[in-house]
Image (tube, rainbow, N blue to C red):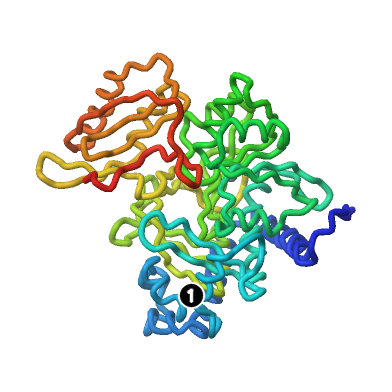
Amino acid sequence: MVAVPTGMPSARTVALVLAVLAYRRRLRRRDRWSRPALLAYQDRALRRLREYAYQKSRFYQDFHAELASAPLSALPVLTKQTLMESFDSVVTRAGLRLADVEDYLATLRGNDLFQGRYFVSATAGTTGRRGVFLWNIREWVQVVASYNRAFDWAGSTAGLTHQVKTAVVSSTNPSHQSARVGASIHSRWVPTLRIDSGEDLDSIITRLNDWQPEMLIAYASMVRLLAEAQLPGRLMIMPRLVFSASEVLTESTRRLATAAWGRSPYNVYAATETSGIAAECGEHAGMHLFEDLVITEVVDVDNQPVPPGEYGAKVLVTVLFSRTVPLIRYEMSDSLQLGGDHDCPCGRPYAVITGIQGREQESLTFPTAGGQVRAVQPIVFHHIMDRVRAAGWQIQQTGAGLEVLLAQPHEVNPSMLAGDIRSALAAQGVLPPPVQVNEVIAIPRTALGKAPLITKTSTSP
Ligand SMILES: [Zn+2]
């Protein structure tokens, strides 16, 4: 039984929603594949992607010259810088120029498509050049379906016959992929309140109380702020499902959210370049990689594979459905840890990520006694800060050392906390810098509304 919406969504929205639902059925069938069947499919999909790129992309004809039949692991790594410098020859459609796409993005309002046929998103580009990515409508169906898969696995019943009131506290900048995904399927079927996470927290709480979402999607740091508001009753919502997307979902945030809403939140891993990459199933024992959509290689700084159980320095992603801008061994700076086996009780055949440390930019570097410089991963700080009772925290590395901001701390001894951090750094083999602990009303948020747990100023080492 199909409910006919009366809000008159555009013909394009209707076609897109129907295509996404059809594709969702295909994705669900893959969840029941055996692992050998999944890997065989992945091989075929990779071969199709490479054949397409070698036919249509001048860039890949050169970049993979003499390597057309080499295994994936022998292919060169594509950086964002190379991609953006070579954009006009990477794309598989003649006449598609980066300059025109940039012009379009600069004036983008609402949900207009580039040249009437391409969805475009840009990466935030806090460091270096921003990345720009395009999808035609066929690719976009798979982008939307990949996000939808995370909701599907969590048991969301959203579909043509059932509306799920959703609230998304995220960026509402139209050049952001999550905003485009939302805008392109917004209709009576998916009644969604989108709140910019840069808004004042009190106003976010008021709007959520008015809307009463059944499903809540937010950055990890926002999930934490909202759980903190729910526990004393300032926020009073009863979502059946909470999703944490982007940023590291720490164990303490997970515990807070579980205490606030009675269920563990679902962690989702996605990036503009790839769309959905991985998501939790109901076991909450790590995130299953979407290996039928994206090949994710966990590698060290020299692009060599890192064994399960160890954190990599970055990932190389191959987006199997990418056609307009083919992405083959594209480098992203996330640090992941793969799980050892594929026997999740849920029966899905996909490998599991058991740890994610967030973007490499979050790792801080410190001098060692031997005169070298060593990176300390965010998880070292998370282990200490997870035990601290506060409404929020942030560690800033400045020229003078570390400044720890605590929002509304309860029973925290600043000198003991500073001592714990210095000991943890010493255990990492670096020279501990001075650590200053300061109390604040609220953790400062970026223009995008994120409250990064670890930041550094440009003058730090
Ligand atoms: Zn599972």
Q: Nearer the viewer, residue 377 or 193?
A: 193
Q: Is the residue 76 above or below the residue 425 in the image?
A: below
Name the residue rendered at 64%, 57% in the picture. 181
Number of labels in the image equals 1
Left-right relation of 17 to 103: right
Q: Residue furthest front?
A: 107
Left-right relation of 39 to 22: left
Q: Check disc 1 and give the amino acid type.
A: Leu
Name the residue rendered at 63%, 20% in the picture. 233
**Label 1: element kind:** helix
The image position of residue 7, as x and y in percent, is 84, 54
Examine the rendering and report whether any part of residue 271 can be seen: yes
- The residue indicated by pointer 1 is 98
The image position of residue 269, as x and y in percent, is 52, 49
Q: Which quadrant of the figure has residue 127?
A: bottom left
> Quarter for ligand 1?
top right
Left-right relation of 220 to 261: left
The image position of residue 423, as x and y in percent, is 23, 27
The image position of residue 34, as x and y in percent, is 60, 57
Q: Is the residue 234 above or below the residue 342 in the image?
A: above
Name the residue rendered at 11%, 39% in the picture. 369
